[in-house]
Image (cartoon, rainbow, N blue to C red):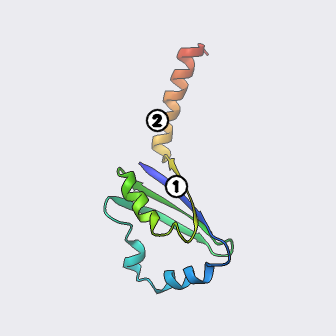
Amino acid sequence: MKFKVEWSMGGEGFLDILNIWSSMTPEQRADVGDGVTMIGRWHDTNARSGVAIMETTDLAALNRYLGQWNPYMDLDVSPVLDDEETAALAKDVLADHKAYHGD
């Protein structure tokens, strides 16, 4: 399952986070733990926020990774679907609507 992870942080600890993040190696930044795949991550440093798409079948593994950053920022996690998954869901929703409403 894919998850959208959005984060935001206040100004008080922002420079500390920048220091931690910039001193990590690319390998350390890419390490999201066993059972979790980082599909992509984007940062808006001016807004002190960002978004990542992660994939896992182990929600505990995702939460373990996010727990490393949770003390420093607010996190909002929600399940998401890609285009093909959404197209399949749309067909099911339309079929259900037709079955129940006859439209």
Query: Is the residue 17 above or below the residue 5 in the image?
Result: below
Q: Earlier in the sequence, mark 1 or mark 2?
A: 1
Q: CA distance from mark 1 to mark 2?
A: 20 Å
The residue sitting at the top extreme is: 102
Q: Is residue 59 left or right of residue 18?
A: left
Which residue: 61% across, 16% down? 103
Relative to the observer, which residue lies in front, 56 or 15? 15
Where residue 58 appears, as percent x and y from the top left, is: 35, 52
The residue sitting at the front extreme is: 71
Relative to the observer, which residue lies in front, 68 or 23? 68
- Mark 2, residue position: 88
- Badge nearest the viewer, 1 or 2: 1
Which residue: 52% across, 66% down? 70
Which residue: 56% across, 18% down? 98
Where residue 49 appears, as percent x and y from the top left, is: 62, 68
Query: Label 2 crowding class (10 Å Cα cut-off): few <14, some 14-19, many 20+?
Result: few
Check disc 2 and give the amino acid type: Ala
Which residue: 44% across, 58% down? 54
Query: Label 1 crowding class (10 Å Cα cut-off): few <14, some 14-19, many 20+?
Result: some
- Residue 19 location, quadrant: bottom right
Q: Is residue 48 left or right of residue 28?
A: right
Where residue 47 appears, as percent x and y from the top left, is: 68, 71
Q: Is residue 55 left or right of residue 78?
A: left
Check disc 1 and give the amino acid type: Lys
Q: Which mark is residue 4?
A: 1
Query: Is the residue 81 above or below the residue 55 in the image?
Result: above
Where residue 20 appears, as percent x and y from the top left, is: 50, 82
- Residue 39 location, quadrant: bottom left
Dot 2: element = helix
